[in-house]
Image: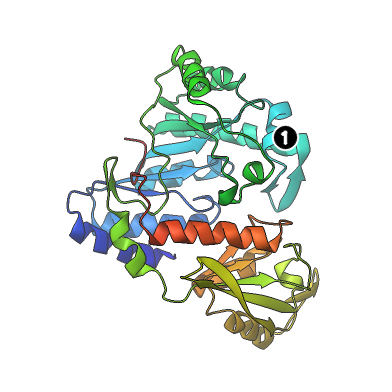
């Protein structure tokens, strides 16, 4: 969704819910990974309704350099996900990050992320923003450490701490879910919240909202944007060279396998293979513009494209065409990845019973 589509969505929802007072940008992805688009969206919504409170959710990696811009735009609520403040723990959670045009791995990646998160938090608090910190409780990895996180973020200006359970259902297709990592029990979650409550106020009513949720905790209106707003045909393109897992860089693909969602079986069924000219053959050897356009046109009828990696330029071009690039299933089997997407799509079109809120900072 680009900024124009976001403004249109806001206008539509505002007519249906005139008491709407908060608008947040929460993903998928990070709100500051594409800052200019985020800023334009915030600016346009503020212009359309100056009384609406603006907020974003971020992992904090790029927060520090954008704090002042966010403040000028009127963002007064901020959520930062900080899962640890110890790089030894962090490298078990974050295998890599992309920062300053470089892919960092291991402990240095975790340390860089943590430093950027804490600096961004401190600057945001000094700028007058109300900062909530989200922390995902991962048993055996950071459960013994979260009280230290709570104490630290409180000292830097955070006003609320929201400890959330890891969603470990394999159907979501996440790394931890597919690797067998369990989520916490209710007793474990409550114990950690009590430990952290010594340091700062705890948020216990979070419903782990999704990014398209509209309404209040007990009255999610997102279902009114549900099945009727879904495409009648839902397709996924997989960058492929014949392997059974998603291991190919988007730029190296010469073929895309196309799968279409079948309503009766609630599964993705193979439809066809589509050959394309390879987007890039080397770091500086990419195809002609006409070939690139032909590639994008070839998969323009798909809603999602799966690959192991993808550059920022093709990512943006796909988004412009309404196609969502997805690298969350990198090196995972195609079958299980499609199954996870099918389950997610099915839940959305069937208007999931779980109630969420637009912005879980309230």
Q: Is residue 256 above or below residue 306?
A: below
Q: In the image, is 31 to the left or to the right of 315?
A: left
Category of crowding for the residue at label 1, using alpha-carbon neighbours closer than 10 angstroms: few (below 14), some (14–19), many (at least 20): some
> Toward which corner of the image does residue 38 lie, by quadrant?
bottom left
Residue 196, position as x, y percentages in the image: 49, 17
**Residue positioned 49% across, 20% down in the render:** 187
How many callouts does the rendering have?
Answer: 1
Quadrant in which the N terminus is drawn: bottom left
Q: In the image, is 65 to the left or to the right of 48?
A: right
Residue 293, position as x, y percentages in the image: 61, 84
**Residue positioned 61% across, 47% down in the render:** 174
Q: Nearer the viewer, residue 143 or 341?
A: 341
Residue 281, position as x, y percentages in the image: 81, 75
Quadrant in which the C terminus is drawn: top left
Q: Nearer the viewer, residue 68 or 140?
A: 140
Residue at the front extreme, as displayed: 265
Is residue 309 something one can see in this rendering?
Answer: no
Residue 135, position as x, y percentages in the image: 52, 31
**Residue positioned 61% across, 34% down in the render:** 182
Q: Is residue 234 above or below residue 100?
A: below
Which residue, given by chain and number where applicable, does mark 1 sit on?
91
Q: Nearer the viewer, residue 67 or 194?
A: 194
Is residue 167 something one can see in this rendering?
Answer: yes
Q: Is residue 205 above or below residue 44?
A: above
What is the secondary structure assignment of the residue under circle 1?
helix
Q: Is residue 35 above or below residue 77?
A: below
**Residue positioned 35% across, 51% down in the render:** 213
């Amino acid at each position: 969704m680009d900024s124009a589509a976001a403004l249109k969505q806001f206008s539509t929802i505002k007519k249906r819910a005139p008491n709407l007072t908060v608008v947040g940008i929460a993903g998928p992805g990070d709100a500051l990974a594409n800052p200019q688009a985020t800023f334009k969206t915030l600016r346009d919504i503020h212009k359309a309704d100056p009384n609406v409170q603006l907020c974003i959710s971020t992992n904090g990696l790029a927060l520090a350099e954008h704090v002042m811009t966010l403040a000028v735009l009127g963002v007064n609520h901020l959520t930062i996900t900080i899962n640890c403040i110890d790089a030894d723990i962090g490298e078990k959670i974050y295998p890599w990050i992309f920062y300053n045009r470089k892919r960092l791995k291991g402990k240095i990646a975790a340390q860089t992320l943590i430093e950027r998160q804490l600096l961004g938090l401190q600057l945001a608090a000094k700028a007058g923003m109300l900062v909530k910190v989200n922390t995902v409780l991962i048993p055996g990895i950071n459960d013994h450490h979260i009280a230290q996180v709570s104490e630290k973020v409180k000292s830097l200006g955070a006003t609320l701490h929201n400890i959330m359970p890891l969603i470990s259902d394999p159907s979501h297709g996440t790394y931890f879910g597919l690797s067998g990592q369990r989520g916490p029990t209710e007793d474990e979650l409550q114990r950690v919240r009590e430990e952290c409550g010594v340091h700062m106020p705890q948020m216990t009513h979070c419903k782990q909202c999704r990014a398209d949720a509209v309404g209040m905790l007990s009255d999610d209106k997102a279902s009114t944007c549900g099945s009727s707003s879904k495409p009648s045909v839902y397709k996924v393109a997989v960058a492929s060279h014949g392997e059974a897992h998603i291991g190919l860089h988007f730029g190296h693909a010469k073929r895309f396998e196309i799968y279409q969602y079948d309503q009766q079986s609630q599964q993705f069924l193979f439809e066809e293979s589509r050959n394309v000219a390879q987007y890039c053959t080397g770091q500086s050897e990419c195809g002609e513009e006409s070939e690139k356009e032909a590639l994008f046109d070839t998969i323009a009828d798909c809603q999602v494209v799966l690959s192991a990696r993808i550059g920022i330029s093709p990512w943006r071009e796909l988004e412009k065409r309404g196609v969502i690039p997805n690298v969350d299933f990198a090196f995972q089997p195609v079958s299980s990845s499609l199954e996870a997407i099918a389950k997610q799509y099915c839940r959305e079109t069937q208007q999931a019973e779980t109630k969420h809120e637009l912005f879980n900072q309230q």
